[in-house]
């Protein structure tokens, strides 16, 4: 079990994920980990590289914000004359591994916030032993960055059951809104998560005072407009014209169902195949954790978002990655409950044996 906290834990998690990214996960999973990130970043810096049809100016379905994260280290390598093929391959893996380790740390933090320290430690065990997290989070998908930003935002988002002193400060909420806005910039489908959470928080504020409702709406509008404007400026620079890739993406995938070009799945696929495959053997302890805790709001949220995601014909395992990370604390709570029951049984058995020996 983990016996340290803070910076030592964060560094250890980052080093572990970087090791996986550089030396272990060296296989091919999905074209998007290259064609929607690294290949685009390479083209941005070095002026050549294949851009798929989504990146053509007349389509503009993808935003340049995500490839820009990898273009920056590519540009640094170019300036320092260190842009060898080996460095071009390794540096993005190191960066993505570090982000995956940061996501692990935030999952641990969310579990501590929801439950107990012991539950958080079991959550970290579940996170590190989950095959899909290890296989997918270290890849350069926008889904991986979305998952990081979502779980990071949940570490600061106001939850109803908490005392206002620690987590309902305006500063924490504003930070959560910024992280939420960035998650929507990098992956517009994250908007479903924040729509539900925003409405829930708005309902809570309405029961307190209209002044707080108005303040929250102003904050949301400020962050939303800033994120849209920033994304639009980045896309203007690289597309050469004004366009809203976020809106184009949602229109193409949600309204026109253009994603079905890449394959279609039945409405129940996420429930019948998606989650069972990526959670795998942790399903029993997940439901155990959900059943024993009164704090089911995040579990309900994942169910609502799954219903929204199920409305599109095209489905993929990686689309569930942010929801998977949000479910991990329930797996940890389930293991903690099993451990507590086992410990009580052992103590009871030991006491019975001692009593029998004394009687003899």
Image: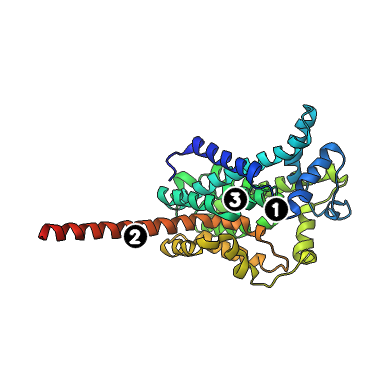
Disc 3 vs disc 1: Cβ atoms closer than 8 Å?
A: no
- Percent position (x, y) of residue 54? 83, 54
Other-residue count near label 3 (Cα within 10 Å), few / some / many at <14 / 14–19 / ≥20 = some
- Which residue in the rendered view is the most extreme toward the top? 80
Residue that carries the numbered disc 2 in the rendered image: 341
Point out residue 234 in the picture as x, y percentages from the top left corner: 79, 43
Calculate the distance from the C-alpha at mark 1 to the C-alpha at mark 2: 41 Å
- Give the quadrant of residue 349: bottom left
Residue 118 seen by the camera:
yes
Q: Earlier in the sequence, mark 2 or mark 3?
A: 3
Q: Is residue 169 left or right of residue 219?
A: left
* Residue 102 rendering spot, x and y as whole percentages: 58, 43
Side of 46 relative to 76 (left or right): right
The residue sitting at 60% across, 55% down in the picture is 132
Q: Quadrant of residue 229?
A: top right
Task: Name the residue located 76 percent from the left edge and 49 percent from the top edge.
Answer: 34
Give the SS element for disc 2: helix
Residue at mark 3 to residue at mark 1: CA–CA distance:
20 Å
Q: Residues within 10 Å of mark 2 (few under 14, many from 20)?
A: few
Q: Nearer the viewer, residue 156 or 141?
A: 141
User: What residue is pinned by disc 3?
Assistant: 134
Of badges 1 and 2, the one in the foreground is 2
Residue at x 10% of width, y 60% of height = 360
**In this figure, which residue is indicated by the disc labeled 1?**
187
Q: Is residue 271 above or below residue 7?
A: below
């Amino acid at each position: 079990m983990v016996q340290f906290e803070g910076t030592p834990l964060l560094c250890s998690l980052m080093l572990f994920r970087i090791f996986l990214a550089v030396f272990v996960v060296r296989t091919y999973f999905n074209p998007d980990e290259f064609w929607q990130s690294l290949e685009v970043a390479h083209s941005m810096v070095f002026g050549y590289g294949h851009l798929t049809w989504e990146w053509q100016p007349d389509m503009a379905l993808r935003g340049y914000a995500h490839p820009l994260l990898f273009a920056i280290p590519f540009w640094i390598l170019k300036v320092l004359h260190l842009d060898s093929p080996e460095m071009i391959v390794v540096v993005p893996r190191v960066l993505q591994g570090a982000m995956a380790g940061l996501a692990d740390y935030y999952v641990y933090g969310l579990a501590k916030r929801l439950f107990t320290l012991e539950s958080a430690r079991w959550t970290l065990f579940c996170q590190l032993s989950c095959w899909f997290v290890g296989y997918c989070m270290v890849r350069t998908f926008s889904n991986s960055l979305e998952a990081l930003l979502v779980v990071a935002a949940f570490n600061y988002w106001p939850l109803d059951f908490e005392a206002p002193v620690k987590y309902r400060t305006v500063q924490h909420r504003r930070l959560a809104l910024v992280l939420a806005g960035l998650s929507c910039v990098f992956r517009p489908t994250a908007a479903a998560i924040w729509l539900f959470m925003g409405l829930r928080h708005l309902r809570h504020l309405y029961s307190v005072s209209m002044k707080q409702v108005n303040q929250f709406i102003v904050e949301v509008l400020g962050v939303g407009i800033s994120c849209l404007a920033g994304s639009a400026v980045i896309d203007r620079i690289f597309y050469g014209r004004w366009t809203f890739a976020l809106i184009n993406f949602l229109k193409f995938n949600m309204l026109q169902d253009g994603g079905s070009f890449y394959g279609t799945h039945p409405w129940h696929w996420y429930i019948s195949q998606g989650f069972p495959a990526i959670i795998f053997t942790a399903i029993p302890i997940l439901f155990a954790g959900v059943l024993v805790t009164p704090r089911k709001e995040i579990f309900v949220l994942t169910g609502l978002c799954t219903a929204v995601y199920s409305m599109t014909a095209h489905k993929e395992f990686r689309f569930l990655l942010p929801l998977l990370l949000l479910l991990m604390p329930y797996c940890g709570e389930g293991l903690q409950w099993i451990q507590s029951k086992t410990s009580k049984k052992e103590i009871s058995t030991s006491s019975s044996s001692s009593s029998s020996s004394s009687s003899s």
